[in-house]
Every structure is written in structure tokens, then in C-alpha cells.
Amino acid sequence: MKITEFVKGFMISVNTGIQHLFRKRMTTMYPETQNYPTLDMYAYDPRKGIAVSGWRGRHYLDMTKCTGCQLCYIACENISEAIEMVPLPETNYPQNKKKIFPAVDYGRCVFCGFCVDACPFYALYMTPVAELSEYDRNDLYYSPYELSKPPAVNPTPRAKEKIDIKRGVYDER
Amino acid sequence: MNTSTNLQGLPGVFEEEVSPEGKLRVSFGPQHPGSGHMRIILTINGDIVEDAIPDVGYVHRGVEKMCEYKTYIQNIPHIERPAIHDSAGTTLPYILATEKLLDLSEKVPERAQYIRMLLAEMNRMINHFYFLGILGIFMGHSTVTTWGMGDRELLIETAAMMTGARVTFSFIVPGGVRTDTPHGFEERLLKSCDYLESRVKTYKDYLLENPFARMRMENVGIIKKEDAIAFGLAGPTLRGSGVKSDVRKDEPYLLYDTVEFDVPSYPEGDAMARTKVHIEEIQQSIAIIRQVVGKMKPGPVKIPLRGQIRGKIGDAYARVEGARGMNSYYIISDGQVYPYRVRVNTADSRNLAIMRRVLQGVRVADVPVVHWSLDYWPVAADR
Ligand code: SF4
Ligand code: SF4
């Protein structure tokens, strides 16, 4: 490398670095602002055979539609065996004569969503809830009642992301 | 009992030792000081590596065997896991081979093919930004690391908007893709592409012009053109040695014959040439994405498949150009719901073949740079 080449390259790279001092910060301040790419639920339309895009997070079970057909359980069987069919004798839903509902173990689930694709009765969805960490492993097991709670969408508003060639990618407050 | 002499060269059983001539045999890895999930047994003479035996297999998970007792759909999530930064490039050949077994290849809707191309090119860029980021930290250039990871995030979030997952998309299925593009997806993708195109120039200025980065990468880990062909290398490693070979051009799959793009290649064959190929490929992927978004027309994105799918009796082979090179799948079906045998061949295992030869004669401090620039990812190579 010639000395002129060295100096020129050095100046170019230092100049690029200095320009970056005037750009906005790319990092998101995580717990205050949350940057979910989408807030839609992942759902599947068995009649059309195609899904509706959304975030594949925690499941949502509609207990008024689930018939206990076990198809979601069969779909998950060889993927991660996260779904277990649990009997709930106290329930009284007319469509569910067997009184069994799916429960999901999030210690095992890989969030592939193929159980949602398998449900023929519009009973299973996936919600944009991704913060599932717990202190106890057993708390990761979600019973049908917990799954059927409407997803607690985080109250903090989603950060408005700006993509600007000059100033960088940043969140607008 | 002295086992170190007769078991020499056998990875796994060795002791660090100093030979009478003053050569030191040390283990590089596997606890990841820049070796990934593998170990290189280095024989060092002063500062020069005299021999390097790659010891692989730490992350073998038996993907091929697992494929034999899962149905065609259940295979998708675990097939993409070995290659987390190129999950579309790894599942795509499996899906293409499965579609051949189902006689679906001709029937996949046009829009589905375009969406698959979009995802594949986005994944190529995600992988290449990751490459630049890790290359930076292996050189001690941590600015590029944070930039690479940050720019990658933009694409990951765009992909997550459509697929619903950040890294393991499970998005391409036999018959098409799982969902149509959501509202505002194309707009955000094109915006990200404009932004990333400006970033490509920044990387060129900051990494390729930087004299210190050049000193670390130029004339380091040279692979000659003949060697690259003889060892059957793939992807940017092959193209960095001056061979213009790309499955997208040689044997177009999906609709790659309808878009125009270049195959960048540099004849030097050193770590710098391979880095340049990666940066150029980001630019080509942006060009492909722009053309594809312009060509996409509304329409169906999937042929609904009902019930369990069964392949016809026979076999099928498909190969695609993944981010790190040619990935291929060979599936034998005996008409059951499970494949009879699945053979996975990834570019990473091909690029591993030359590692011993390339590392001979480099300096110890250059080992991480050469190792990473070879585009070898242990998890995908071990499968
Ligand atoms: S998302 Fe996948 S792993 Fe999780 S419960 Fe459903 S099928 Fe099983
Ligand atoms: S959630 Fe759907 S697939 Fe699962 S048991 Fe209920 S109805 Fe059947």
C-alpha cells in the first residue's frame, strides 16, 4: 500500500465516521417504546386455505368455537409436542361434547403456527404478544382458560419508525 | 500411557503439547473465541499456523434422520433452524423438491413465486449484513459490527411484518406461501431498500477503503481459482476466487430468469475479495427486489392442499442459491406421509472442505478473519 493510498483511505473512512455523529440513534429504548413490526393477529381461513399475516406470538383460543377435534394437537405432535388436550368437565359449550381443549406449553412451542393452520373451526389464533418470560418453568404452561383471555396488547403506543437516508432509522416520539 | 502420538490427528483425543522442534499444538474453540461451534486444532510455529485440523460435529442434530418420521409440513420448522440467518434459502430447496413429488411445480401461482423471491433476497441481505457485522468483530472493528446488526434489523422487521416471525419464518410451504403481503409491506420494503443502498456506499467507504481493514484482509487466506473448483466450494467463497457461478443464473428456479442482475466476482481470492462479493451482492439483491415489486400483480398466493400430503413414489432433487451458496435437497418418497429419505447438502459443508488448506501459513491473529470469510456456519454444516 502506497503512503498516498493509505492517507486517502484513512481520510475517507474517518470522514464517514464523522458524518455519523450527526445521525439519529438507531437503538430503541426497549421497555418504554416497543417496536412490534405488526400488531395484527395471525389467523387462518380454512375455507380459503390461506392465512392472514400477523405476528406469531402467544396463542388465542376461542372456547366458544373449539370443538375438541384435536387437529391442532396432531399438527404439533411431531414439531414440538407443545399442545396437550386437557379435559375441562366443568365447561358447558354445546359444540364441544368431549369437553377437551388445547393447552400450550411455551417452554416447548417454536411459534411455527402450523397448529393454527390445522384448526378447521376458526378457534385458534396467534397474537402479537411475545413477552412470555417467567421466573418458573411451570408458569410457561398456559391452560385453555389462560389462552382464551384476550391478548393484553401493551398499552404503550408503538414507536413510529422513520426511515430517512440522511438521518438514519429512528423512532419519532 | 502415551496416547498422543498414535492418536495424532484424531480430533477429540489430543493434548496440548510442545513438540521438540518448538511447535505448539493448541485448540482454537470450541467455546467460541471466534471459531463458532467448532474447534480447529492448530499447530503453531511462532506466529505462523503450520497445520489446522477442523474438528466439527459439536452441533450435529440429525436433521436428515428427523425428516424420516415427520410429515412434509412438520419438517419445515426444524429444517430451517440450522441456518438461522438464511432460513428462506434453506427451506426453499426442500419445498421445491417436495413440490416436484406432489406434481405441483408447474401450478404454483406467479405471485407466490415472486413473494418467495422477495423473501429469499431479503434473507440474502440479512445474512450478508450479519456477515459484515461478525467480520467486523473478528477484525476488532466493532463499529461495523453495530452497523451490520442495526441495518439487518430493518430487514428483519420488514420480513416479520409479512411472515410473523423475525428469523425462523416457516413461511414457504408446498403450494405457495402462507400469507399474502400485508398492507404497507411493499412500501416499507422499497423504503428500506433505498436506505440500505445508501448504506452500501458507507460500508464501501468505511470498510473497503479503510487502510487498517485492508491490511487485515488483503492477501489473507488466498484460495486459487483451481482450488476453489477442485474443492467444490460454493457461494461468495467461490465467486471471491474468480468463478462466476450462481445457481440463479446457471439453472434458474422460481422466476429468476425474468429479472436482471449481475453475478459479482473478484479474482483475488483473498478475504477482501470475499467481503467485496458480499457487499456487491447486497446491491444486486436490492436491484432484484425493486424489479420483483414492480412485476407483482394481485392474485392467488397458494394452492390450498387439504389433508395430509403424500409424495408420489419416486425421488426429487432441487437446488437453490442460498445466501452462503448452493443448498440442495434430495428426497426419496415411498408414497407415505413421511419422506423415506432426505439428503441435505448445504454450502457450509462444502466451504469447510478447504479450511485446512487455507489456514496453513496464515498468522494466528488472522485465523478468525479467514475462518469467517469462508462463509462456513458450523450449525448448517453439521445439520
Ligand atoms: S405454534 Fe407450532 S410448536 Fe407452537 S403449539 Fe403450534 S404447532 Fe406447536
Ligand atoms: S383449537 Fe381448533 S383444531 Fe384444536 S381442538 Fe379446538 S377446534 Fe380442534
Image (cartoon, coloured by chain):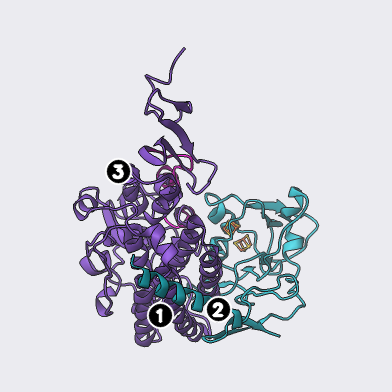
Q: Is residue B31 magenta?
A: no
Q: Is residue A9 above or below residue B39?
A: below
Nearest the eye: B83 or A152: B83
- Residue B355 visible within the image: yes
Residue B270 marker: none
Rendered image: mark on residue B357: 3
Q: CA distance from mark 2 to mark 3?
A: 40 Å
Which mark sits nearer the N-terminus, 1 or 3? 1
Please determine whether, in this image, residue A52 is positioned above or below residue B334: below
Front: mark 2 or 1: 2
Residue type beneath disc 1: Pro
**Which secondary structure lies at badge 2?**
helix
Q: Nearer the viewer, residue B46 or A47?
A: B46
- Residue B101 in view in this figure: no
Q: Ligand 1 near label 3 (Cβ, under 8 Å)? A: no
Left or right position of B215 against A155:
left
Label 1 Cα neighbours within 10 Å, binned few <14 / some 14-19 / many ≥20: some
Q: CA distance from mark 1 to mark 3?
A: 50 Å
Q: Chain A in the picture: what colour?
A: cyan
Which circle marks residue B300 in the picture?
A: 1
Residue A130 sits in quarter: bottom right
Numbered range of the magenta stretch: B53-78
Q: Chain of mark 3?
A: B
Q: Position of residue B319 (x, y in %)?
A: 29, 59
